[in-house]
Image (tube, grey):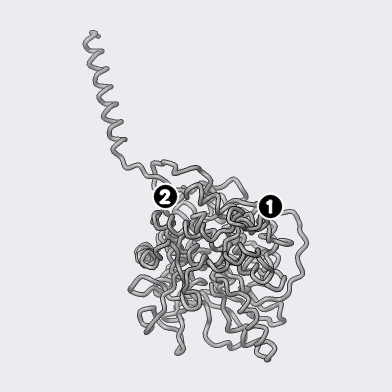
Amino acid sequence: MSLSRHRRIGTGLAASTAATLAAIAALPLTVVAAPAPADAAAAREAASWLAGEVADGALPGPFGSPDWGLTIDGIIALSATGVAVPTRQAATAQVAAHVRSYNSYDDWGIEGFTDGGATAKLLYAAAAAGADPTDFGGFDLRAEALSLVAGADAGHQRGRITSRTTADSGPDASNTFDQSFTVLGLARSGDVPQDTVDFLVRQQCAAGGFRLYPDTGDGPSPSCDEQAGATLDVDSTAMAVQALLAAADEGATGAAAAADRGVDWLVAQQHADGSFGGSGPTTGANSNSTGLAGQALAASGRHAEAARAAGALRVLQLTTSHGGAAADAGAIAYNAEGLAAAVGSGIDDVSRDQWRRATAQALLGLAQVPLGRIGLDLPPSSPGPTPTGTASPTGTASPTPTGSPTPTAPASPTPSASASTTAPAPSPTVSATAAPTATPTAPGGAGGLPTTGAAITTYVLIALLMVGGGSLLLLLSRRRAT
């Protein structure tokens, strides 16, 4: 072979290589977005403070007894950040040991009632924490949740999560938070029935936002648009968007389009400083609504808006630099007034419950791990965006399982398509901790994820109603805000 032939081959290889490299360079480079380092650090500081509030494996309510709904919120927060793994494992074990304390009225001596929304939230939390949802405290939460979903004979209520009761308790009080947890939990633990997704989509009005309650004074309303004057709610919309993203990853029809409309509506509700408010008594800017909305924005790839929400949350975070007590550094206030009071005199015993609830929900907007990816993705800790050649379905961290006890490939509430058909592996053995003596609390507790900072008012109202002899009626009708 002549030298010129070698040269032609070499030139051809060089040209081919150059063309290949040029083609590769021309391909769009997708960056898996991670929160800014300051946001990730702030999220971990908040989670560390929250972990310090856990006592005997549970977060206490305002009267000191374990609040299982709030404890679940804490488990979700710790799972999202990777902070205090032993504390999270102990709390998960305690919740597993008190399933019926949370999703029934057994502790009140009222048998035959199972709360659908609480069961759905337990299903999601078990998966997010790396436990086995089909054997959580001896309960198959997936099967239980599926049994509580209304069937074809329910008409326009088909697909709705409901409560089971042996008594006539009137209309079911499940809300959009409950339905979102149903979709998230079912997607995380296996496939998600289309009916459950369709019912959630019907809670969305044409404007894009979701209503909190499917019912009116005249009974269940077929859809949001058919309810005159329906109140659209930031918190409910943020939850629904994340649930629909999970359903879309599972191939559910109509979920992606509904999620897109929902996030567009959320963007339009964002205040100039990046914060959000809820509806009704939570209309003012608050960290609960801002945390959920910011998390949903990040999940939907709206990173600029998510970053603005995170900035608003950092402003509400207690630090030693502005006079906060070192023991409470990292906690996030419900609003500016709460922060100012704590900076001046510390977090007192009366307001500490509100701080726990606000911090558990708010830090999700700092961590920016979607609800559907918690327990699947590595907690945010990298110093910046990580290039990758494949787009993440949620626009956030890639679906790399964590090294902590989380499921290896479970179907998460907002999971990518690769994590939905295999049941999560059980958590490693958790060291035994004494189960706290629980004062009975109604299903869902007063500390569900959707609950904002008005927890004490709810407890006082409950006490007054019970003194008046209306405890049973109250228990059968009251709902978690989430």
Residue at position x 68%, y 76% in the image = 441
Viewer-proximal residue among 194 and 100: 100
Q: Which disc number belongs to residue 392?
A: 2
Task: Sort mark 2 into few (<14), some (14-19) or many (20+) by Cα contacts within 10 Å.
Answer: some
State which quadrant residue 87 falls in: bottom right
Residue 342 lies left or right of residue 290; in this view the side is: right
- Provide the secondary structure element on which disc 2 rests: loop
Q: Position of residue 190 (x, y in %)?
A: 51, 60
Residue 390 lies left or right of residue 10; in this view the side is: right
- Provide the secondary structure element on which disc 1 rests: helix
- Total residue callouts: 2
Q: Position of residue 149 (x, y in %)?
A: 51, 74
Whether tag 1 and tag 2 are in contact, CB under 8 A, the answer is: no
Residue at position x 40%, y 45% in the image = 31
Instruction: Name the residue type under label 2.
Output: Ser
Q: Position of residue 329 (x, y in %)?
A: 62, 56
Vertical comparison of 266 with 89: above or below: below
Question: Can residue 78 be seen here?
Answer: no
Residue at position x 63%, y 83% in the image = 461
Viewer-proximal residue among 126 and 478: 478
Vertical comparison of 234 with 309: above or below: below
Vertical comparison of 47 with 119: above or below: above
Q: Which disc number belongs to residue 372?
A: none
Q: Position of residue 172 (x, y in %)?
A: 53, 82
Q: Which disc number belongs to residue 86?
A: 1
